[in-house]
Image (tube, rainbow, N blue to C red):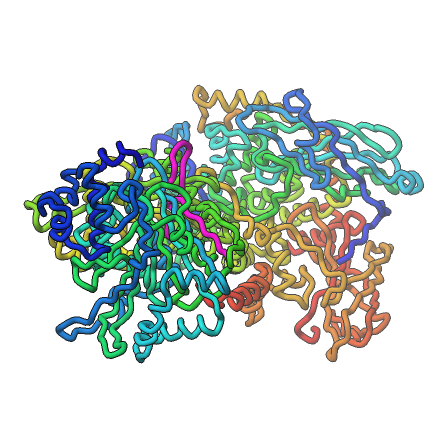
């Protein structure tokens, strides 16, 4: 897929950086709060009531390209959005130098739940048309309200629970694991009441590693199969579903339909006229996600190694 | 010896006098006659009730043909006067034959077993309770001149014909004897194994009547041990003779209580041959090396008080005057046939001592351990393997650690109902396990007595090959039980467990003593289990076997409980690391060379009608047979949600493809296809200059509309 | 209703979903109220005032004018059940309303009119733009102009606004939302198809135009909003006229004007829209 714009746009991208984070006017320590590499801001909010967070932002555009091109009155609009609370605030930043803009974005506690996307776009007048979007921010930032340290969280949540003691899991209490799916996130529940499961999965003995990895990949195969089947129910037409479903599909569809582009594969599923071998394809894609072939091979090899004379 | 010594030691004088009469073959009556005293008076001297006057003493010396003052010095040297010799027991009148030491074949013999039994005996014989029993094993291989002198000292030449005659049989014992002689003849070497103990009682007591001496030297199956200190059938002694190819053992004792007024260097030898016939005479087998005792007939020989020189020649010189016994096993070997070299024998002995007695060798600050053991190996007087003091922490590190922690009161105990767990590599967990000891059949009926045995559990290293064992012992601190614990939970830390039962718990309770008795009765001769032996079932009320089984079952269950890793960790420690790498939702980068056609470039502009005129390059993946059927898609980007599609007004193939309806048929042998298209304005959701256009290709199943 | 709970609660998605079998969705099987109550976490909000609204709605509107109930209910629900956006983002609350407090309303409003009537699952447990109660509350929150719920009424008057426009991300920029409603008010767009076409045009053009830059918004006064939420207990919400919303600032009129003009042009110029308007 390639895009084409009906007016000249910037070839290079705009960079957005966060200079400072202030919690109710108190600056937070940079290193532990801001991760430039992951583009994440972690707010240490454990047990603390705050009402406002201010982010000091700086946007930089490729200066030569900008000055040489047909764009006039370029300005940067910074945006703060959260899908879950339907928040989308926009602030035009102030000129901070040639091809640079600075300013602040304010977030209010009442307006946010989980993750706020900090992004923006470069706006200019092109061919007498005002307000043209001429560049996007290639690497937007995320403010995590529930994180404790700046690490990526784009993964499926895994939680231990004693199924027999949790009302919504009680009916699965005989099972070692189950998957729970909501719009927000899929969760893999591991049954701490299942004897020995925790010990196997969290064990550290090197000799047990093949068994451990085999078990993990078995869990992952069933997990990814379930997630895929759930996610495709939310495909309408040619749209990628929001949130985790879209992410899960983006990971799996290339393996389900390796001969199609992801968008093409999405159409295929969305159309409803699915390939007759779809379940098999899904199974193999899940096996691949779970790295099952490798862990099974290791396990088999480890079996062949033991079995020598026991003392 | 001073005059005082004589007057204050009538017993010693009496014993001396008796010995002299024996040697001379003179009876008390005969002496009385010669001295012109009553026989009763002589009897009184001999029994130590009275002492003769100085003039009579001199007369006695004369009559007996002894040097003047001999009664004072009691200089004996019976050896040089030829009084010491081998006495062979004649065959049974009833014609019964023992074809070997029956006791020696009661169980599998090996050098390790010998070491175990010998050391156990020594432990049981501890004299001063506050000091250790010291046991020393000396392997000494002699040859050449040394060998010859030794053979002289034990009157070997006298033995050989008997050994040969006894060896001339197809029975097992005979083969061993014949083998021994053959090897001696071929190699010219003889291996002596000497076992000393110090701070033990020594072979006290009379020559024939009940006492330690008689039990060891004369009786076959006699457990002299009283009380709870031992309790076996005395089979252990047999293994000492079993360790000699010739069944030949010489003993030297320092006594804890005097016999015949003397303590040091009570020496006697014994050889256990099977029935044999020599020069027309039949012999039952056993023979003793000692002083003949005519009072008991020809067959008996007594111990004698040897000179220092004699014990030297016999390789039996003891190192200190502490009481105890030294056994010299002549022609020592490993009956199990495993150890052959001096080094291997040394190692076998060390290992056997460590394995069986580590618990008795564990000491704490300020307290000596019950047992100290060492092993040394020599050849013709030169050290071949230096003396090694067996260190329990070296051979049984985890178990020794556990026991020491218990003795020092540094174990971790269960509090209330809480589970007790191992957290550090050095932790020693202590748990109580109850044994219900039933009443003896001879006692009045009553409830079982509850004994709380102590179970210690401690982690061991991964490399410990015998990890996950429980070893159990009672007051003797000898390992009786040694079992692997089965059905361990996954992830359990490798451990060693020690069960202290009976009086091993170190308390002074009646329940412990009863439990000690109970468990002793539950031990078979090999001392390697607690089970329903005949002794147990005959002594104790019904249900004894069940109680024992329940106890052991509870022990294993407790071990499992202690080593189970905590299922419910207090903190929810997040996803297991092994799963995390499989849970990623972040996008994976697309392949650089995808296996499907992709749009490589789009260029163009809007025409006057507001339609897009586009030139599109398609990248085709590697060769295949069939042509590609692709449908070009024109879409418009949106802020969110679905992207509306527009239609093509015109599609024109430019290179390496054909247009058929709204489908492009591309040449499978080419890497690039190019087409041009014009959009259908009426299908635009907004005027084209208001939207971002996107071009993509999808595969068309059908051949085109 | 057997019993009315006295407090509101939160019912997690997975649990709520587990109660929705075919029988329940067809209103052939009752929802196990006791079990649902047990599975919920109660919060400190009275249920009575909220319950009352649904009774009133079902009383005011006949069954065959039920879609009209949305326009009445949305503002009063927003004014009665006063929530911060954060609180409203918790789907557990909406699940509780649908399964415990007022399932009868869900059936009344959303039971399909066909041979085998059934309620779509996502009316009970679903995204904010589809769930029976969440959609009304969020429509009110996203379409009001400060304290003025007037635009909400207009928006809810057209089902396609609720179905299509409400879920567009672009309407979170308030001037954009208001501009779309302005076109409805002024009759530039009328039918459902027109609304959809407008929505698509706005959505598409938004990739080339920055509505945020062309029509800047004033930040909402979150403190004022908070005060308004906390005054819920004393508030009296009228039923016969539009209630008054939070005084957290009006949307700049100039921005709305700019976008309304722009959108009208987009709509009129839109080739596809032309086609539909010709057809209708």
Compare residues B368 and A133 and report the one nearer the observer: B368
Farthest residue to the left: give it: B444
Task: Name the residue nearer the viewer: B291 or A47.
Answer: B291
Residue at 40% across / 47% down in the picture?
Answer: B318
Q: Which residue is rendered at x = 50% and y = 35% of the image?
A: C74
Quadrant including the N terminus of chain A: bottom right
In the rendered structure, the answer to whether residue C270 lies left or right of residue C62 reads right
Is residue B643 located in the magenta-colored stretch of the structure? no
Against B376, residue B506 (above or below) is above
Q: Which of A290 and B448 is in front in this view?
A: B448
Q: Is residue C5 above or below residue B187?
A: above
Front position in the image: B208 or A204: B208
Q: In which quarter of the image is residue B284?
A: bottom left
Residue B362 is covered by the magenta coloring:
yes
Q: Quadrant of residue B705?
A: bottom right
In x, y percent, where is residue B30? 13, 53
Q: In this view, does C96 lie above or below A109?
A: below
**Quarter of the image that includes the C terminus of chain A:** bottom left
Residue C13 in view, yes or no: yes
* Magenta-drawn segment: B354-378
């Amino acid at each position: 897929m390639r895009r084409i714009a009906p007016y000249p746009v910037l070839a290079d991208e705009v960079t957005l950086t966060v200079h400072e984070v202030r919690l109710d006017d108190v600056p937070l320590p940079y290193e532990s709060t801001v991760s430039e590499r992951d583009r994440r801001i972690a707010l240490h909010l454990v047990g603390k009531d705050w009402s406002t967070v201010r982010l000091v932002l700086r946007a930089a555009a490729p200066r030569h390209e900008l000055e040489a091109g047909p764009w006039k009155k370029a300005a940067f609009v910074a945006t703060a959005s959260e899908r879950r609370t339907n928040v989308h605030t926009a602030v035009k930043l102030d000129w901070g130098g040639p091809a640079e803009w600075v300013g602040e974005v304010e977030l209010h506690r009442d307006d946010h739940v989980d993750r706020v996307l900090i992004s923006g776009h470069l706006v200019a007048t092109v061919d007498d048309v005002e307000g043209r979007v001429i560049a996007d921010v290639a690497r937007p930032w995320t403010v995590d309200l529930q994180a404790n340290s700046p690490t990526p969280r784009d993964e499926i949540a895994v939680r231990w629970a004693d199924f027999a003691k949790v009302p919504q899991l009680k009916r699965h209490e005989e099972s070692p694991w189950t998957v729970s799916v909501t719009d927000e996130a899929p969760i893999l529940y591991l049954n701490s009441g299942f004897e020995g499961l925790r010990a196997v999965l969290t064990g550290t003995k090197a000799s047990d590693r093949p068994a451990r990895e085999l078990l993990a990949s078995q869990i992952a195969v069933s997990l990814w199969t379930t997630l895929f089947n759930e996610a495709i129910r939310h495909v309408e037409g040619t749209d990628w579903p929001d949130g985790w479903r879209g992410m899960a599909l983006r990971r799996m569809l290339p393996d389900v339909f390796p001969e199609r582009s992801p968008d093409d594969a999405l159409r295929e599923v969305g159309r409803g006229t699915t390939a007759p071998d779809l379940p098999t394809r899904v199974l193999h894609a899940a096996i691949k996600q779970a790295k099952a072939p490798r862990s099974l091979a290791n396990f088999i090899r480890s079996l062949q190694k033991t079995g020598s004379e026991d003392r | 010896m001073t005059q005082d010594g004589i007057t204050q030691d009538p017993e010693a004088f009496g014993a001396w006098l008796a010995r002299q009469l024996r040697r001379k073959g003179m009876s008390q009556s005969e002496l009385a006659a010669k001295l012109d005293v009553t026989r009763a008076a002589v009897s009184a001297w001999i029994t130590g009730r009275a002492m003769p006057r100085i003039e009579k003493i001199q007369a006695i010396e004369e009559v007996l043909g002894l040097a003047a003052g001999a009664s004072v010095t009691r200089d004996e040297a019976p050896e040089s006067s030829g009084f010491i010799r081998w006495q062979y027991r004649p065959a049974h009148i009833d014609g019964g034959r023992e074809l070997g030491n029956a006791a020696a074949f009661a169980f599998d013999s090996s050098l390790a077993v010998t070491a175990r039994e010998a050391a156990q005996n020594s432990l049981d014989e501890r004299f001063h309770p506050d000091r250790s029993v010291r046991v020393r094993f000396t392997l000494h291989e002699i040859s050449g001149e040394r060998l010859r002198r030794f053979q002289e000292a034990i009157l070997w030449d006298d033995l050989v014909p008997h050994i040969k005659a006894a060896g001339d049989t197809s029975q097992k014992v005979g083969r061993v004897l014949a083998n021994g002689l053959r090897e001696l003849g071929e190699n010219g070497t003889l291996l002596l194994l000497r076992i000393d103990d110090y701070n033990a009682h020594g072979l006290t007591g009379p020559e024939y009547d009940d006492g330690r001496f008689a039990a060891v030297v004369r009786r076959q199956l006699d457990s002299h041990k009283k009380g709870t200190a031992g309790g076996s059938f005395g089979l252990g002694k047999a293994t000492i003779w079993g360790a000699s190819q010739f069944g030949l053992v010489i003993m030297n004792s320092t006594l804890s209580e005097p016999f015949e007024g003397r303590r040091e260097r009570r020496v006697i030898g014994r050889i256990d041959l099977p029935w044999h016939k020599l020069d027309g005479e039949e012999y039952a087998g056993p023979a003793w090396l000692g002083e003949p005792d005519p009072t008991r007939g020809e067959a008996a020989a007594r111990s004698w008080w040897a000179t220092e020189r004699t014990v030297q020649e016999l390789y039996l010189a003891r190192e200190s005057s502490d009481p105890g016994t030294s056994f010299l096993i002549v022609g020592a070997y490993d009956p199990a046939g495993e150890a052959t070299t001096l080094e291997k024998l040394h190692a076998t002995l060390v290992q056997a001592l460590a394995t069986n007695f580590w618990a008795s060798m564990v000491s704490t600050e300020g307290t000596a351990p019950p047992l100290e053991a060492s092993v040394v190996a020599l050849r013709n007087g030169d050290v071949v393997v230096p003396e090694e003091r067996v260190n329990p922490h070296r051979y049984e590190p985890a178990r020794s650690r556990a026991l020491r922690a218990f003795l020092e009161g540094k174990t971790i105990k269960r509090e209330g109902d809480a589970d007790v767990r191992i957290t550090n590599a050095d932790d020693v967990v202590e748990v109580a396990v109850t044994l219900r000891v039933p009443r003896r059949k001879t006692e009045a009926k009553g409830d079982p007595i509850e004994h709380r045995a102590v179970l210690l559990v401690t982690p061991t290293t991964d490399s410990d090959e015998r990890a996950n064992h429980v070893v159990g012992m009672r007051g003797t601190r000898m390992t009786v039980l040694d079992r692997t614990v089965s059905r361990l939970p996954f992830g359990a830390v490798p451990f060693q467990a020690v069960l202290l039962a009976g009086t091993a718990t170190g308390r002074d309770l009646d329940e412990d003593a009863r439990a000690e008795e109970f468990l002793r009765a539950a031990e078979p001769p090999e001392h390697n289990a607690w089970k329903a032996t005949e002794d147990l079932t005959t002594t104790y009320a019904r249900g004894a076997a069940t109680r024992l089984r329940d106890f052991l079952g509870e022990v294993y269950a407790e071990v499992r409980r202690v080593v189970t890793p905590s299922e419910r960790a207090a903190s929810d420690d997040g996803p297991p690391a092994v799963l995390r790498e499989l849970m990623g939702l972040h996008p994976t980068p697309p392949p650089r060379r995808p296996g499907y056609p992709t749009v490589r470039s789009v260029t163009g502009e809007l025409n006057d009608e507001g339609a897009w005129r586009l030139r599109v390059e398609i990248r085709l993946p590697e060769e295949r047979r069939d042509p590609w059927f692709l449908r070009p898609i024109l879409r418009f980007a949106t802020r969110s949600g679905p992207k509306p599609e527009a239609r093509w007004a015109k599609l024109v193939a430019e290179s390496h493809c054909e247009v058929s309806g709204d489908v492009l048929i591309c040449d499978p042998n080419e890497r690039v296809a190019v087409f041009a298209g014009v959009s259908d304005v009426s299908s635009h959701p907004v005027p084209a200059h208001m939207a971002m256009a996107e071009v993509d290709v999808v595969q068309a199943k059908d051949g085109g509309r | 209703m057997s019993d009315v709970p006295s407090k509101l609660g939160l019912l997690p998605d997975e649990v709520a979903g587990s109660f929705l079998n075919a029988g329940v969705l067809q209103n052939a099987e009752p929802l196990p109220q006791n079990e649902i109550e047990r599975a919920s976490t109660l919060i400190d909000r009275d249920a009575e005032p909220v319950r009352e609204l649904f009774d009133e709605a079902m009383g005011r509107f006949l069954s065959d004018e039920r879609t009209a109930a949305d326009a009445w209910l949305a503002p009063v629900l927003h004014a009665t059940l006063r929530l911060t956006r954060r609180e409203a983002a918790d789907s557990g609350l909406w699940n509780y309303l649908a399964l415990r407090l007022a399932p009868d309303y869900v059936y009344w409003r959303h039971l399909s009119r066909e041979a085998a009537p059934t309620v779509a699952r996502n009316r009970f447990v679903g995204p904010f733009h589809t769930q029976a109660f969440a959609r009304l509350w969020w429509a009110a929150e996203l379409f009001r102009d400060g304290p003025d719920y007037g635009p909400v009424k207009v928006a809810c008057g057209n089902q396609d606004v609720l179905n299509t426009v409400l879920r567009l991300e672009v309407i979170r920029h308030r001037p954009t939302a208001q501009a779309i409603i302005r076109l409805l008010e002024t009759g530039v767009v009328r039918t459902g198809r027109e609304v959809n076409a407008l929505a698509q045009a706005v959505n598409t053009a938004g990739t080339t135009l920055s509505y945020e830059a062309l029509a800047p918004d004033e930040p909402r006064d979150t403190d004022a909003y908070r005060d308004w939420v906390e005054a819920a207990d004393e508030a009296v919400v009228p039923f016969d006229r539009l209630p008054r919303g939070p005084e957290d600032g009006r949307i700049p009129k100039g921005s709305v004007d700019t976008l309304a003009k722009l959108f009208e042009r987009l709509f009129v110029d839109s080739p596809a829209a032309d086609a539909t308007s010709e057809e209708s």
